[in-house]
Image (cartoon, rainbow, N blue to C red):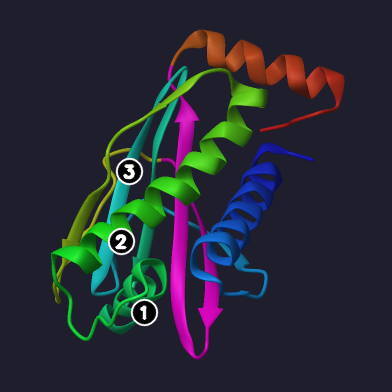
Amino acid sequence: MNLKEFIVDSINQSTLEVFSTMLGVELAQGAATFEDAKPGIECEVISLIGLAGSWAGAGSLSCSAALACRVCANMLMTEATAVNEEVLDAVAELTNMIVGNVKTALESKLGPLGLSIPTVVYGRNFKTKTAGTTDWISMRFDWDGDYLLVKLCLAPHDKDAHHRIHLFEDAGTLAA
């Protein structure tokens, strides 16, 4: 299994597990795509969280305002009809759980990684752009006709990271 496949599998498992456990929702397996770092139009709600260590990057969760309200309603067992602080906090926590689980899975292959606190943006007509050139791994999950995008970009941050990935390649465990 190469690194991209491992990340795709980790995102898929983490997202399905968090939705099942925390929201009581069974999602179908996500579909993966690979996107370059060019700016792209996002959904109405996006939550970003940084990863750092010998590898560095970011994870994100994007969705419509309606889906963000559904996340909050299921997570907090309360009604959420409009995006407010509780909704944004619920999306931030969902991002923290999903990307945090992915980070934990990746650490077994890539070494220790740190996780920042999530930043959530809500609005329309905005674009995001990554400063690096690393591709994003994007997975789309459908929830009753609405969709959630979970994305991750990750690149070696130092020479030891390159060495570590080659050790896994040689062992047949992980390839870039």
Q: Which residues are magenta?
A: 134-157
Given residues 174 and 103, the one toward you in this image is: 103
Residue 50 is drawn in which quadrant?
top left
Identify the element where label 3 is drawn: strand
Decide: is 49 above or below 86: above
Q: CA distance from mark 2 to mark 3?
A: 14 Å
Residue type for callout 2: Ala
Viewer can see residue 39: no
Label 1, on which residue? 70
Q: Amino acid at mark 1?
A: Arg
Residue at screen point 30% across, 33% down: 116
Residue 49 horizontal/vertical position (percent): 32, 43
Give coordinates of residue 48: x percent, y percent: 30, 49
> What's the mark number on residue 49?
3
Residue 161 x/y as whole percent: 55, 16
Screen quadrant of the N terminus: top right
Which corner quadrant holds the C terminus? top right
